[in-house]
Image: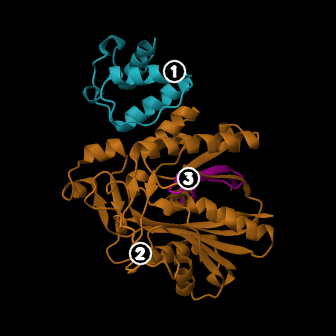
Amino acid sequence: MSFRILGTGMYVPEKIVTNDDLAQIVDTSDEWITKRVGVRSRRVCVHETASDLAVEAAKNALDNAGVRAEELDLILAATVSGETVSPSVSCMVQHALGISCPAFDINAACSAFLFLLETAAGFFARKTAKKILVVGAERMSRIVDWADRSTCVIFGDGAGAAVLGEGDGYLDSVMTVKGGDDVIKIPQFIGKSPFYEGEQESPYIHMQGQETFKYAVNAICDDIKTLLARNQLSVDDIKYIVPHQANKRIIDFASTKLKIPHEKFYINIENYGNTSSASVPIALDEVNRAGKLQRGDLVILTAFGGGLANASCLLKW
Amino acid sequence: MVFEKIAEMLAEKVDCDVSEIKGDTKFADLGIDSLDITELLMNIEDEFGIEVEMDTSLVDVNALVAKIEALTAEK
């Protein structure tokens, strides 16, 4: 027993920030951002917290699934940009939904949604849950350095969610971690201990562009090859590949290296930027609500990011 | 041999005639950015069976050829 996805949902804040808007803040241009990253606009919070975004995405997923909040046995969430370390986003979603099931967060940065699915699969396998809500929610605008033109143009805010129910739709998964902080790092506030002698690093996203690009492309290629080979499938058997929307050029180059047609990859980064743990469920919700998936279709979700951690799964819709 | 292969890969990348790629051709003059260079280095890894560290200091074709020749000599 694993699970199948009963419904999906997403929510993004109303405020749209275009590349031209960003060119007013840092030395950049629409042409440079579009060519370099593939983002044309992103949503940015004015009032909402990451938890607020999570709650709305969760409600939309419950609606789409036709499941009442009271039916949930567990809430799993992820964020790297939440306003509070505690309570977790999942606890705030539980609170907002007015229910009493267990709830906890997992940190696997941009790959977290895949790690949430894998964790959920364990609960279904042990038959300790019949319905689980999984949510990735990010206010990345909180943790980007708005004076750093190489990173602030990439990210956006948003949340994506899915409601899982008992079933056999989670066919296979692969997870890889290559721990270290030299490629991607998001330092926290160091604190004010009178005894600690460490130095505060700027508490924003630090990313080595070339190393991140190489790692990400290899992660996508290795994961997809593994899932296809292990399940004796060809890419023609897959309806869609839904990748983490980190940078359009990462997806394009992975697609070229894998010799998989670009159209097979669902891409929406132009509208949202990189929303970290929210990007895969947001993209999946768009694919779902556009009616692009029929029951029985095979879908690959693939993500990579800080950790370094990458993970992918094969789903039967 | 290394130069010819890299010139061929670069020409394909920027869609120009291979004769236009010289040793002193600067990457910036070809209009390619650091991610293009990363793609090129990854293709070179596949082509030559070597592992190349990402390097932002490479400015021209000669520098890249020297780096790849050194790495292939170590094999």
- In this figure, which residue is indicated by the disc labeled 1? B72
Task: Look at the image and say whether residue A262 sits in the magenta stretch.
Answer: no
Q: Chain of mark 1?
A: B
Residue A236 vs B62, above or below: the answer is below
Q: Are marks 2 and 3 on the same chain?
A: yes
Q: Chain of mark 2?
A: A
Task: Look at the image and say whether residue A293 sits in the magenta stretch.
Answer: yes
Instruction: Determine which quarter of the picture holds residue A210.
Output: top left
Judged by depth in the image, the label closer to the viewer, 3 or 1, is: 1
Q: Residue at horizontal 57%, vertical 83%?
A: A94
Q: How far apart are the two marked residues, 2 and 3, measured between alpha carbons?
A: 36 Å
**Quarter of the image that includes the C terminus of chain A:** bottom right
- Tell me the amino acid under the disc marked 2: Tyr
Judged by depth in the image, the label closer to the viewer, 2 or 1, is: 2
- In this figure, which residue is indicated by the disc labeled 3? A303
Q: How far apart are the two marked residues, 2 and 1, measured between alpha carbons?
A: 47 Å
- Colour for chain A in the figure: orange
Label at residue A196: 2
- Colour for chain B in the figure: cyan
